[in-house]
Structure formats: C-alpha cells, structure tokens
Image (tube, helix red, strand yellow):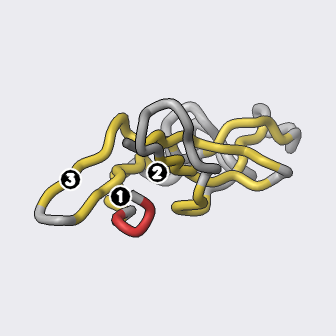
Amino acid sequence: MGFDAPVVDEGEAYIGLATSADGVSFSRFARVTASERDVEGGKHHYRYRALDQPVCGLDRRAGRTTLWVQREVPGIYGEGQDCCHKPITRLEAIDVSRWV
C-alpha cells in the first residue's frame, strides 16, 4: 500500500511517497521527485504548497509501479509566474517500484 502527497518541508517542495504493509503504520516520506514551493500573488512570499501534485493512486502493471504527477498545476504559481506566464500543465509518469 502506498500514500503519495505533495510535501513542503524545511523550505523544500517535493512529491513524497510513504508505504505500508498493513495500512496502519507507514514509512517516512521518500522523496520521489523534486518540485517548487508556490509564492503568494507575485509578492515573493513563499507559501506551503508544491507547484506539482500527485494524481490519486498508483498504477501497477507488469511488475512496474507508476505514480502520475501533474506538473505546473494551474492556479499554483512559482517565482516569476502568474496567470499569463506559466508553463503548460502536463502529466509525468514516475517509476516508484523501488519504494513499493
């Protein structure tokens, strides 16, 4: 069993994955992929969200476990970004087999 989440910890943003054999006790978050922290409306005040968000669930096929991450989620802005200046959102498949 796995639990994925966007994590902002000690100033760093990343997509984390915690695993469990029993669904009760989970491991610490493994840093699956880096992200960036969001800023508040062009004011350069950092908040506690990641620009990238995991898509719900894990996909297991042919011995490979994949976590899908939505990069550049609309409405969450990084340094120098706003509604008119932001990369296009996209999905990225990340192999997380070594953690599950």
Q: Is residue 11 visible?
A: yes
Relative to 50, does residue 96 appear above or below in the rendering?
A: below
- Give the residue type at disc 1: Glu
For discs 1 and 3, the disc positioned in front in the rendered view? 3
- Which numbered disc, 2 or 3, marks the residue that appears first in the sequence? 3
Q: Are marks 1 and 2 in contact (CB under 8 Å)?
A: yes
Q: Secondary structure beneath disc 2?
A: strand
Q: Is residue 80 visible?
A: no
Instruction: Tell me the distance, in whole angstroms, between the alpha carbons under discs 2 and 3.
Output: 21 Å
The residue lying at 38 percent from left, 57 percent from top is 100
Q: Secondary structure beneath disc 1?
A: strand
| Residue lying farthest to the left in this orientation | 62
Instruction: Tell me the distance, in whole angstroms, between the alpha carbons under discs 1 and 3.
Output: 15 Å
Relative to 42, does residue 24 appear above or below in the rendering?
A: above
Residue 92 is labelled as 1
For discs 2 and 3, the disc positioned in front in the rendered view? 3
Please state, as top left, top right, bottom left or bottom right, where the N terminus lies in the image: top left
| Tag 3 residue | 60
| Residue lying farthest to the front in this orientation | 22
Q: Secondary structure beneath disc 3?
A: strand
The residue lying at 37 percent from left, 39 percent from top is 55
The image shows a total of numbered marks equal to 3
Q: Residues within 10 Å of mark 2 (few under 14, many from 20)?
A: some
The residue lying at 20 percent from left, 53 percent from top is 60
- Give the residue type at disc 2: Arg
| Tag 2 residue | 71
- Give the residue type at disc 3: Arg
> Quick one: 13 or 24, which is closer to the camera?
24
The residue lying at 50 percent from left, 36 percent from top is 74
